Image: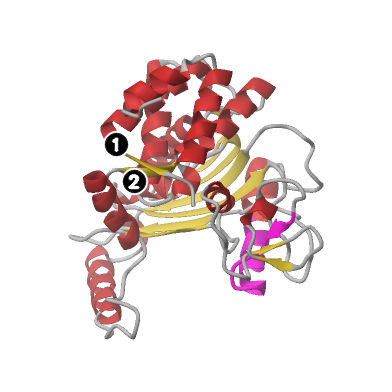
Amino acid sequence: MADIHFIRAEPLGAAIRELVRGFGSEEREVGLVSDNLIEANLTGHDSHGIGMLPRYSEAWLDGGLKANAHIQTLMDGGALLRVDGQRGFGQVIGREAMTLAIERAKEFGSCIMALGNSHHLCRIGAWAEMAVAEGFVSIHFVNVISRPIVAPFGGRDARFGTNPFTVGIPVAGREPILLDFATSVIAQGKARVAHNKREKLPLGRVIDDQGNDSDNPGYAVVEPLGAILAFGEHKGYGMAVACELLGGALAAGLACTGPATGEKRVLNGMLSIILDPKAIADLATFERETRAFLDWVTASPARAGFDKVRLAGEPEREWRAKRLAEGIPVDANSWNEILAAAARLKVDPAKINRLAGIKS
């Protein structure tokens, strides 16, 4: 087990903003990238948090990530949009694309948006949160263009990415439903975190380079590479294929069709559907039936090993409260990788430590 640093959100934010300036980003971009990554850590998704910065630095140095890029509208059909992310930071591209789509949903009652060529969009739930904050339903199919990391059901090597799927549903007077998951049984970043923490994985999550079950997360991270499995066997695999075809082939015009090329990039395509409930249904009925169903489901008595029935989005809110109070845990190996990324970006690692409150 690696040593763990517990860092408060505010000093960690100062340290990460200093690092992100090393990309040459304007201050707005520095804030959006840093805040988005730290929010992922706060909500318990360390796989999509600050531990992504080493990969970002490699992609930027290799030309696969562009600082200070913005969306470009390729097709505007009113409620039907196609935009290009120009390999910009997904934290910026995702926000700009969703802002545009939400504006169109306000005007037309719905919007279908195809986004391609964005660098890593991070936690897709962040984009659904933007929609539910406006009272809209939000559905997202996403593909990943990077090193293939997930094996198809019945296959013994990696053929596609972790291909997330997300749904956000507003609930009047309550917290929204936020369903956000990779179609792999674990996110690739969770394997990286487990590898850095020297932890084993339960069997059934990764296979080795020969296609055999393994508890070693390293097979998803370092050579010799194996693969992560899809969740729910054929069901997760089927959803991954849908995300690849809709988020990739359709929305981005780019699907995973071969092995890794060696490019240091994490590109996402995303097909998003934004819907105003009152444009298609009686709003009062929708709200009433939603609350009644959720009350019925969560009233189920907890079975052994559980304290209660939770809804999608609730665990993230619980993690956020806990980590705001106790600090964000970052294992020493991951932190050293972040310091190495800072050095690659010509940012003084000692200053990053100092801002985070960590003794060098």
Q: Residue at x 40, y 30 (%)?
A: 34
> Pointer 2 and pointer 1: residues touching (CB < 8 Å)?
yes
Q: Earlier in the sequence, mark 2 or mark 1?
A: 1
Q: Secondary structure at mark 2?
A: helix
Q: Secondary structure at mark 1?
A: helix
As drawn, the label of residue 9 is 1
Give the image quarter of residue 55: top right
Residue 228 included in the magenta stretch of the image:
yes
Residue 331 locus on image (x, y percent): 45, 43
Q: Residue at x 55, y 26 (%)?
A: 340
Cα separation between marks 2 and 1: 8 Å
Q: In the rendered view, tell whether residue 284 sits above or below residue 305.
A: above
Residue 138 locus on image (x, y percent): 42, 53
Q: Is residue 309 left or right of residue 263?
A: left
Give 222 or 256, whichever is nearer the viewer: 222
Residue type (three-letter) at the residue carrying disc 1: Ala
Provide the residue span drawn in magenta.
226-243
Q: In the rendered view, tell whether residue 232 sits above or below residue 60.
A: below
Q: In the rendered view, tell whether residue 176 sits above or below residue 55.
A: below
Residue type (three-letter) at the residue carrying disc 2: Leu
Label 1: few (<14), some or many (≥20) within 10 Å? many
Residue 7 included in the magenta stretch of the image:
no
As drawn, the label of residue 100 is none
Give 80 or 241, whichever is nearer the viewer: 241
Q: Is residue 334 visible?
A: yes
Residue pointed to by mark 2:
42
Give 116 or 49, whichever is nearer the viewer: 49
Q: Residue at x 78, y 65 (%)?
A: 211
